[in-house]
Amino acid sequence: MSGGFEFVFVGLLEPGTLTFYIAILAIIVLSYWAIPPQWRQVFLATVSTLILISLDWISYLLLLAIGLLNFALTKIRFRSTPLLVLGLSLLIVPFAAHETARVIFRNSEHYNLVFMTGMAFYSLRLIHYWFEHFKDRLPKHNFVDYYTYLFFFPIIIVGPIYRFDDFVKSMRRQRFDLKKVRAGIDRIALGGFQVVVISDILISKYFNAWILEWTADASWARFYLESIEFGLNVYYQFAGYSNLAIGVGLLIGYKICENFNFPLFRPNIVEFWKNWHMSLTGWVRSYIYLPIVSYTNAPRLALLLSMSTIGVWHGFTINAVMWGLYNGIGINLYHSFKETRLRAYFVNGHPIVAKAWLIFSAIFTFNYVMIGVSFLR
């Protein structure tokens, strides 16, 4: 899912490439604040379009066609369940076809022909928009607002999953704020540090070299350490890209939602998922978990189906589904354990026992999550 954005980031350590991207971003930001306010949305839409076309013009045309069809459906005055299903089908089928093609052509020389840049996050934003339209909860807006939201360049490739009402809220509160600009620069620096220094150098290069040197082939130690390496890489890459997006958004006055809140070493798996990929878990809660609970009154089942959905979104493979179920089972088991007297004794007992339990549970949760990520390797 992040392949397109990683393409943008390739070579960032090279001074010439880094200078080029900084210069382009500076031109965009300065131009954005220099033009009259009434033209800023058009400017932002144009910049977003040019960036995506420069990355993958075929993907842009396909995403545009899906977006235009969705917008046309919202102009139908009556609302009915068949219309809701039709709209969702027209959004889900292209995503499913895309993910299926990715699996089929994964090891083929034709993979680049079937990979659509930005499809994963674009689909979730469109489904969110369609649901909110159907429930008549969208703020007043025009087509330019809708178009800019769909192709908003800081988030088009790797998110976060920016909700439309939050996007419009930021759009309507536009004003230059030097504090936001400074905060944006700080977030961009943090994101770049997480991706380049921590992930690309410390984990992928040095930690990986240490694993290969000090563990035997096909040993449990290597499997365990490589699972941790992969999990840490996923976190620092994804958190880094999210911070980059949030930072760029702040530079042009948009408050993009947080996506990661230091999820590693949380005391239990529920707390981990409350702070891991928060825009995705929030989306799944709104459009998968709560509707299933309202129809079935079975929260445990809804949780398993929700986590399976998260797995499927990460890839149309058995391993991805198993990863989602693995986490769903872990969360359900924790909810069951939370109601036992044993947990009450550990949490509410002697301060030393409670502290030891907190440390143990954080280490256990970290290992449970990291081993589970091996399903996605």
Image (cartoon, helix red, strand yellow):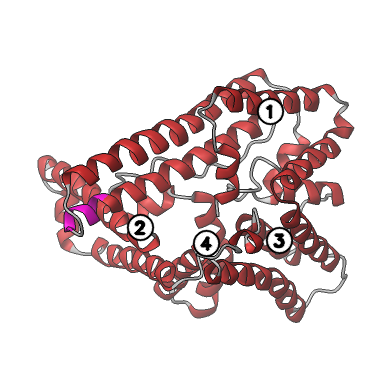
Q: Which mark is residue 25?
A: 1
Amino acid at the residue labelled 3? Glu
* Rendered residue at 56%/37% (across/down): 9
Residue bearing mark 4 = 285
Q: Residues within 10 Å of mark 2 (few under 14, many from 20)?
A: many
Task: Tell me the quadrant of the picture where the C terminus can be found.
Answer: bottom left
Looking at the rendered structure, the kind of residue marked 1 is Leu
Q: Residues within 10 Å of mark 1 (few under 14, many from 20)?
A: some
Residue 260, visible in the rendered structure: no
User: In the rendered structure, which disc, 1 or 4, sits on the residue that comes first in sequence?
Assistant: 1
Start-end of magenta stretch: 219-225
Q: CA distance from mark 2 to mark 3?
A: 32 Å
Measured along the vertical axis of the image, is residue 344 above or below residue 187? below
Point out residue 255 in the picture as x, y percentages from the top left corner: 64, 36
Expressed as whole percent of the image width and height from the top left, the position of residue 295 reads 54, 78
Q: Amino acid at mark 2?
A: Val
Q: CA distance from mark 3 to mark 1?
A: 32 Å
Residue beneath disc 3: 132
- Asked whether, in this view, residue 106 is left or right of residue 167, the answer is left
Q: Residue extending furthest top?
A: 178
Q: Is residue 131 above or below residue 228?
A: below
Task: Identify the mark at residue 373; answer none if there is no mark.
Answer: 2
Q: Earlier in the sequence, mark 3 or mark 1?
A: 1
Count of all numbered marks drawn on residues in the image: 4
